[in-house]
Image (cartoon, grey):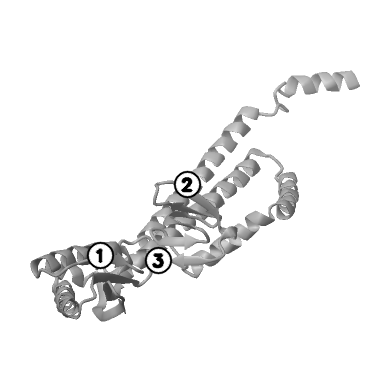
Amino acid sequence: MIGTALAAFQTTVSPNAFAIHWKEIALGRSLRLLAVLAVIFAAYRLAKYLIHRYIGKQPTTGSRAEMRHQQQVRTLLDLSLSALTAIVVAFGVIISLDIIGVNIYPFAAAAGLISLAIGFGGQYLVRDLINGAVIIFEDQYVVGDNVKLGDLSGRVEHLTLRRTVLRADTGALISIPNGGVANVINMSRDWAHFAVDVLVPSDHEVTQKANAALQEVAKNIKDEPDMKGALVGKLDLLGVEIIDSKNATLRIEGKVTPERRDDVIRDIRTRVREKFATDHIALNGVQVTS
């Protein structure tokens, strides 16, 4: 009887009735995976577009304050894009593994152990990240600033949470971990001071003529249209600062925008030499003291 029933079951049920259709399952998961990845990619592109649109706006007035704000925004923009990319990649990997059917909990546990190990072994990295966040959000310096960090100085080429990259005057790139940044001297903020000493013979008559000539030089520089955007306030002629048996030292000082400091000093040197040559005043030297 049992043999008869088994024979009847075999004739009514197809041999493939209990076969697992791996192709259909794989095709279904592949389509789902592609759909999810497409959504993640579209969301990433949208977020990137919004970041560029609402954070990375370009200056409109060209004012110094707005340019400085743009430099800070550019730094934050780079950090935002880096963080967004890391989050999207991590989320995409987790979702993809789940769709494929890989149990992600062992990976999560392993990631927790790895994070713990990194926490013990990566103390310096954590310090770099924390100090980098402080540097950025306190606006100590941004990309484009000329700074001195300890004994190293240069123009900030790149800034992340972990490191600061300076371009030295020699052209060399200097990479500094943010955890090692203790003292910051920013030479690109607001204004820079300068003082130019003009040395002439200590004779009283020569000193008087030199002082009058320097007053005219200072006035001409102040009235120069190209210098109005460089000078912060007015040029001060302090008169005779030092006098000895040979030389009398007359000083001109003032405040300028940091990026124009060298230009202003060169212009003063040129104008002093030309003015003294025109007025036949002996000139023993021109020195920059600060």
- SS at badge 2: helix
Residue at 38% over, 69% down: 189
- Dividing the picture into quadrants, the one containing residue 15 is top right
The CA distance from mark 3 to mark 1 is: 27 Å
37 lies left or right of 97: left
> Front-most of 99 and 258?
258
Which numbered mark, 3 or 1, is in the foreground of this view? Answer: 1
- On the rendered structure, is 119 left or right of 53? right
Judge depth for marks 3 and 2 and give the one in front.
3
Amino acid type of the residue tagged 2 in the rendering:
Phe
Element under label 1?
Answer: strand
Residue type highlighted by circle 1: Gly
Alpha carbon distance from label 2 to label 1: 66 Å
Q: Name the residue under label 1.
A: 285
Res 237 quadrant in image: bottom left
Q: Is residue 162 above or below residue 20?
A: below
